[in-house]
Amino acid sequence: MANIDDAIARGSLHILMFPFVAFGHISPFLQLSRKLSAAGGIHITFLSTPANIPRISSLLPSSPSIRLHSLPLPAIPGLPAGAESTADLPQHTAELLKLAVDSMQPQVAALLVDLRPDLVFFDFAQPWLPSIAHPLGVKTLFFSVFSAAATAYLTVPSRRSKHSIANIAGELIRPPAAFPDSTALSAGVPAYQAADFSYIFRSSGDAGELSVLDRVLTGLTGCSAVVAKTCMEMESPYIHYIESQLGKPVLLAGPVVPESPAGSLGLEWTTFLDQFADGSVVFCSFGSETALSEEGVEELLLGLEMAGKPFLAVLKGGTAAFGKASADGSGARLVREGWAPQQLILGHRSVGCFVCHAGMSSLVEAVVSGCKLVLLPQRGDQYLNARLFAGDLGIGVEVEREESGGFKREAVRDAVVRVMEEEKGRESFDKWREFFMDGEVQKKFLEEFVEKLKELAYGKSSK
């Protein structure tokens, strides 16, 4: 700790990172921390709760410019002892973590007095942070871990509604007031997606408890600036709209392009993948926290089989449905459950297509690896990410859905065959892959972002 304290005393920019206790949120904060620490002249204190620190530590480089700090998560009624991340809890109970994080305010306030960082990056679940940081002269940055398209469509001040919760889904079919024209979202979204989005307006507990939208808008309007992991090249209409809605700058960190993964694929994967020609295998995975219904898993596997391509699927509940989807016992199909080394699989020479839920990190990983995309979003911002990639950027094909939001095996088959056999969209795919992999472009994004942070912290350009 002495090394980082000495560096801070010598004028290094000191940033406190404080994500919500969900690894879908912690991960982007970690990715950004690694980028910033590599830039030089920046030191980071990464704040979380004790149970999350070991995993966070394993995902950070051994560097004197990053230190971890833990604060205990207060006990609240209904929250099991030792549960400190959304992965530890069912979704309905995970809402209690927001209340527990709210109870950390006195500890966080004392920590800010002690550390006096120049900047604090915070998440949607801590809308109270600006009110305790600003009186100390500490600038705050709301770090949106979502695409600018998702923020622009769902969580801008124009979404504050006078409608009842019962009618809110009807409003969410349409974009908010003054939304930009000529984007993939300008015509709105299907009713089943709007119904899914309506949860952000609901309070899950007692009267007076903040909804997700309340938390996000309080954080966005109260912070010194907003940070987004995107760039003008990808999302300029949405970024300009967010800035016009908030009346404050959106600082762009650039797209979070994944680092090359460490290690190599184990035999349990290569024994299967090595059998096939380059770019011929379809890999299907929906991440560790997204689960399809039993019917959805069956339709997906049957659709993959109908496409006539070898496939590897890693799905919750996948092995139970596999007998129905592969009664012929063909060796061209492998279905697993549990964790999979996604980046390493995407990088295998035989994998040419990725069927996924349209999480932003997964999308970029696939493009960088040279894998064509079939998009089957399941909830929340995934629907908007799919529209951004397939619609605005021209990357990938979205599986056709029924009015209810369900999908049929034929739609899966058609999407896979289309991306694997047609050349349409190849030009856009190659363009964006080159963009993501251009080291000079990514270096420029980082340099410009760091300069903006210094301007915010010190009140003037450091050049």
Image (spheres, rainbow, N blue to C red):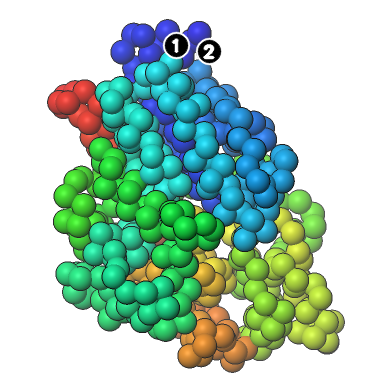
Residue at x 42%, y 84% (from the top left corner): 191
- List x then y, in percent, for residue 358: 49, 66
The amino acid pointed to by label 1 is Asp
119 on left or right of 204: left
Mark yes or no: residue 102 visible. Answer: yes
In this orientation, which residue lies closer to the viewer: 289 or 110? 110
* Residue shown at 79% from the left, 78% from the top: 322
Tag 1 secondary structure: helix
Q: State left or right for residue 32 relative to residue 1.
A: left
In the displayed structure, would residue 306 be above or below residue 290?
below
Q: Which residue is mark 2?
A: 1
Dividing the picture into quarters, in which one does residue 239 lie?
A: bottom left
Residue wearing tag 1? 5
Residue 412 picture location, percent across and down = 57, 84
416 lies above or below 365: below
- Which percent across, then down, holds residue 171? 32, 78
Callout 1–callout 2 Cβ contact below 8 Å: yes
Category of crowding for the residue at label 2, using alpha-carbon neighbours closer than 10 angstroms: few (below 14), some (14–19), many (at least 20):
few
Quadrant hosting residue 313: bottom right
| Residue 442 seen | no
Decide: few, some or many residues near mark 1? Use Cα within 10 Å; few <14, some 14-19, many ≥20. some
